[in-house]
Amino acid sequence: MERLKLVLQYFQSNSESISNGICIILALVSVKLYTSFDFNCPCLPQYNKLYSLGIMIVPPIILFFLGVLVNRHTGVMMDEWMRPIGNRSKNPAVVKYLFSAMLQRALLAPMVWLLVTLLDGKIFICAFSVSVDPTLFSGFPNSTDLDVIKIMAKVPCKEDVIFNNTSFHKAVSRYIRCYSQAVGWSILFFLIVLGAMARLIKPCFDDHATFLQTRYWSNYLDLEQKLFDETCILHARDFARKCVVQFFEDMREDTILCLPHPPFITNFGEEWEDEEEERLHGITKQEQMDQLLNKWYYSKPELNVTRIAHRPRMCVTWKDCKGKTLYSDV
């Protein structure tokens, strides 16, 4: 149970891990969709290939755009690419890194769908049954009035009456399924070899220090936007609370009930108000907030925190009644 909590905390704190998890879920969903999908071939020469290729191509396109949509790198990349330069220059290497990460994750679910369809072979049989030479197999049902193309188009429909008492359609299906699985395993082998070669060869040609810098600043952009959104949410909550309290105080009647108020409660209320004022950062009007958001978009702050990192800190010293220093705290 503790390990599960640690895994969940890791995924919640790391947006890249969240993107990986979402893409893996999409891949599993694609497998589940295919296994629950009841594929029925039309068994007509003019529609078999069109319908089968549509099933092989259209769902991967949908899954690809869905992967692009749910990937957090997409928003970060577009924000960095489209933003005005302002006080911060753009780094094309960071945009390229984010695009590569987004593309790799978005392609996972479509490739899983394509590989599952090829390894299963039903769609491949429906698409290319009319392209097989029937003379290669025995038991061709030539007792019907149908031409060869129409008979071959009915091979995926094994329940058709023309294939009664013959194993012709089984032989053709096995033949096409072998080609389909060969193509599927070849694509999978190629992708694995390509990934392994890329992992082994890339360090030989790329500057690792440059790669570390690119990855650092791509993570920085993601975290910066997340922290800005969280700060805006906190500010909006405190701003809304102030507006509501101010509204009720404006509507309050002139009669005020005076009661003795303990000093510690007064001090607590003052500390709470000071804390709220600090979280408002001096932004108390709509025009100020609009100006701040406009400045954040058009003029991002430069990447230099020297001023706030080295600002002087307040030192508090505790002394006894004789003036002797007991201890100090920053």
Image: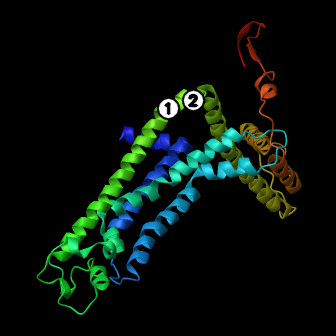
Q: Is residue 309 left or right of residue 51?
A: right
Residue drawn at x 66%, y 48% is 76
Tag 1: amino acid:
Ile
Q: Quadrant of the C terminus?
A: top right
Q: Position of residue 279 (x, y in %)?
A: 75, 43
Residue drawn at x 27%, y 64% is 177
Q: Position of residue 291 (x, y in %)?
A: 87, 51
Query: In which quadrant of the rendered view does residue 217 lie?
Result: top right
Residue toward you, 326 or 241: 241
297 is higher (above) or lower (below) than 306: below
Numbered label attached to residue 201: 1
Report if the CB atoms under discs 1 and 2 are less than 8 Å apart.
yes
Residue drawn at x 67%, y 47% is 230
Res 235 seen here? no
Residue toward you, 17 or 269: 17
Tag 2: amino acid:
Phe
Q: Is residue 94 left or right of residue 247?
A: left
Q: Position of residue 312 (x, y in %)?
A: 81, 21
Which residue is labeled 2 in the image?
205
Residue drawn at x 79%, y 45% is 280
Res 131 seen here? yes
Q: Quadrant of the N terminus?
A: top left
Determine the residue located farthest toward the bottom in the rendered image.
145
Residue toward you, 108 or 275: 108
Q: Secondary structure at mark 1?
A: helix
